Structures are given as C-alpha cells and as structure tokens.
C-alpha cells in the first residue's frame, strides 16, 4: 500500500492480472481485487486518518479475548464470541419482536452478563449468577460465567470455567442491560 501526494492510498501488490485470475471468496473479489490500482480517499483530519498502530491494537484485543493472558487466567481460543450489544436492538433500543430465536437467546444470555458486570458486583467477585448457555454433547454445561471489565472500562470479558466458552462484549452502554447508576437515571 502506498500513499500519493494528495493523501490518497493506492493499493499495490501483484499485477492486476494476477489478482483477477484467482477465483476465491467475495472478500478477495470485491474487497481487494475490486480496489486494485484504485485511489482511496483518506480523511484530511489527522485524528481521523488510518493509524499504523490500529491493526496491532485490534489484534491485541483479539489475542486477549481468544487466548492471551487476562487477569492471570489463560483464556482458550475455541468458542470465542466478539459481540456488540447494539446489534441485537432496534432503533428504539429494544429487542425486536422478529429477532430469530437463537439470536434472542444469545442476546438475553449476553445481556445477563452485561447487567451483572455493570451492576458493580463483578468488581469484587468475577463469578456471576449467569449459567453457561452451551450444551456440549447434548448435556447442559454446569459452569457459571466469570466476567469482568477489561482495563479500557468499556469491554466486558467473560468465560465459562467448565467448557471454556468465552468472549468479549462491547456496545452495551445505554442498552437496557446497562445497570450503572448514571445509566439508570438516563433511561
């Protein structure tokens, strides 16, 4: 990737014929091949420009959620969920009536974790009263979710100590599950 004098990024790497000849998924076809040789405008404001550190920061969040160290515990890679609670809500900040059953169940499960952590109870004890949602080998997991805020204060990390289902949840601020005192006054 290069940058022209006008502050435009130019995608480089291999010839147009090389990338067009490959038959692969839509990300390659539309996300990369479609931009071959095209100038992509970047914002003029320095604060809005792409930063070289951003991929490393995002990878670190992923690494911590999926297998890195978190408060001295090792969190495994398998069954990792990265979710944004706003994706389960409509414009009125409510769960839509037409939300499919599995998505509704996941929203309620994650919402219970968010409610527990934002109520302040996880500050002293990471164990919640939220039962694990998984059914490995068609048997209900006996685990109880452990959850806490990450250092950034807006990411909630959670894990089942039995089956190792785990994830990070963001975008919970101002949702019906946000139990912080200041949030309750704003509702």
Image: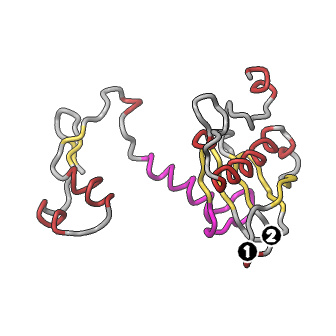
Tag 2 and tag 1, C-beta contact below 8 Å: yes
Mark 2 neighbour density, 10 Å: few (under 14) some (14–19) many (20 or more): some
Q: CA distance from mark 2 to mark 1?
A: 7 Å
**Magenta residues, as a range?**
53-80
Question: Residue 136 appears in which quarter of the rendering?
Answer: bottom right
Q: Position of residue 99 (x, y in %)?
A: 61, 46
- The residue tagged 1 is 136
- As drawn, is 29 to the left or to the right of 54? left
The number of numbered discs placed on residues in the rendered structure image is 2
Is residue 135 shown above or below 36?
below
Find residue 141 and name its label.
2
Closer-to-camera residue (7/92): 92
Q: Nearer the viewer, residue 33 or 187?
A: 187
The residue at 73%/79% (across/down) is 137
Task: Please provide percent x and percent y for residue 53.
Answer: 43, 47
Q: Residue at x 28, y 68 (%)?
A: 24
Which x, y percent locates residue 156?
Answer: 70, 47
Residue at 73%, 66% in the rendered image: 134
Q: Is residue 83 left or right of residue 143?
A: left
Taking 164 as reference, is 78 left or right? left
Q: Colour scheme of this structure image? A: secondary structure
Q: Nearer the viewer, residue 79 or 97?
A: 97
Which residue occupies 83% across, 38% down? 119
Find residue 183 and report its horizontal and vertical position in percent.
Answer: 75, 26
- Residue 151: in magenta span: no
Residue 10 placement, left or right of 150: left
Name the N-terminal-most of marks 2 and 1: 1
Mark 1 neighbour class, 10 Å CA radius: few under 14, some 14 to 19, many 20 or more: few
Residue, far bottom? 137
């Amino acid at each position: 990737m290069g940058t022209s004098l006008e502050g435009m990024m130019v995608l480089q790497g291999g010839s147009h014929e090389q990338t067009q000849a490959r038959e692969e998924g839509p990300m390659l076809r539309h996300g990369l091949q479609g931009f071959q040789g095209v100038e992509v405008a970047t914002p003029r404001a320095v604060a809005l420009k792409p930063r070289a550190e951003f991929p490393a920061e995002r990878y670190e969040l992923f690494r911590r959620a999926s297998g890195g160290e978190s408060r001295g515990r090792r969190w495994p890679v398998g069954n990792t969920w990265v979710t944004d609670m706003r994706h389960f809500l409509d414009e009125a900040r409510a769960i839509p009536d037409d939300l499919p059953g599995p998505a509704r169940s996941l929203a309620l499960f994650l919402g219970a974790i968010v409610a527990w952590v934002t109520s302040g109870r996880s500050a002293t004890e990471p164990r919640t009263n939220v039962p694990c949602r998984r059914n490995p080998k068609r048997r209900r997991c006996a685990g109880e979710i452990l959850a806490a805020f990450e250092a950034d204060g807006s990411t909630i990390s959670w894990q089942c100590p039995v089956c190792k289902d785990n994830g990070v949840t963001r975008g919970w601020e101002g949702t019906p599950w946000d139990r912080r005192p200041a949030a309750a006054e704003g509702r």
